[in-house]
Image: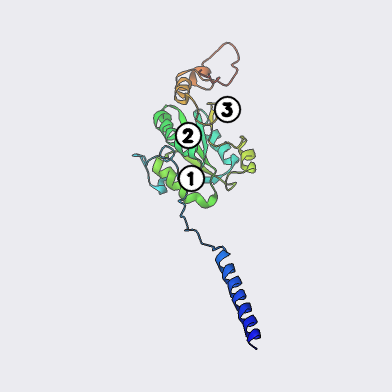
Amino acid sequence: MSRSLSLLTLATLMISALLLGCEQSAPVMTQPTPTKVAPPVLSAEAAPAKSPNAISPEAVVLTMGNEELLAESLKKHRGKLVFVDYWATWCGPCVEFFPHTVQLHEKFGDKGLEVISVSFDNLAEEGKVRLFLADQGAKFENILSSYNGASVEAAEGFQFEGVLPHFRLYGRDGSLLAKWDGAPENIDAEIERLISGVDPVSPAAEAPSTETPTETAAPVASEQ
């Protein structure tokens, strides 16, 4: 009987030791402290301050449309140079350059330059687009692409490579003079040259001549 108790006691001690060893060797899972990640924001350079010439959102001329609306606008502005800015609020370089687009309108608007902006934001972001345009003082025609955001379909419709920002400059006869992917270099000097120079559709070009006049688009000189 005593031998049976001894064996039972020994077995109990062995099992207890085995269980204790398992508990000591089992890894302890700990939950890492959650880290709050701030949403991405534009750099100071890419987030322009509110313009001193800001207007109310209600005063912004913003129309939803596609390339047909743009074509109608270009036709409406025949006789003037037209600068078109393709952009989006989520595009850092677009937002960074946009104040300069506004400056072009302020500088040359009364000298024969029209400005049109085409936003490729989602249609649900219309309020955000309107507020941005108001803060920047965009007192020109603005189009919100009806393609509902940037897409291959939108790029094909507006006939560009789909890279934003994208800029185009049209002559007084509606012909495309130049286009840029990225900030257009020397754009101020180029517009100044075209405004000051003789353009095929300007009054100087329509002066009486003994020969039949031929309309050709004014070349855009590239400065090194």
What is the number of the mark on residue 62? 1
Label 1, secondary structure: give it.
strand
- Which quadrant holds the N terminus? bottom right
Indicate the position of residue 131 as horizontal and vertical percent values: 43, 47
Q: Which residue is mark 2?
A: 115
Residue ID at (59%, 76%): 13
Q: Which of 24 and 84 lies nearest the eye of the viewer?
A: 24
What is the number of the mark on residue 176? 3
How far apart marks 3 and 2 lie (CA) works out to: 14 Å
Which quarter of the picture shows residue 209? Answer: top right
Q: Residue furthest front?
A: 2
Q: Which of 181 and 173 lies nearest the eye of the viewer?
A: 181
Indicate the position of residue 182 as horizontal and vertical percent values: 52, 31
The first of marks 1 and 3 along the sequence is: 1
Residue ID at (46%, 44%): 61
Q: Residue furthest left?
A: 52
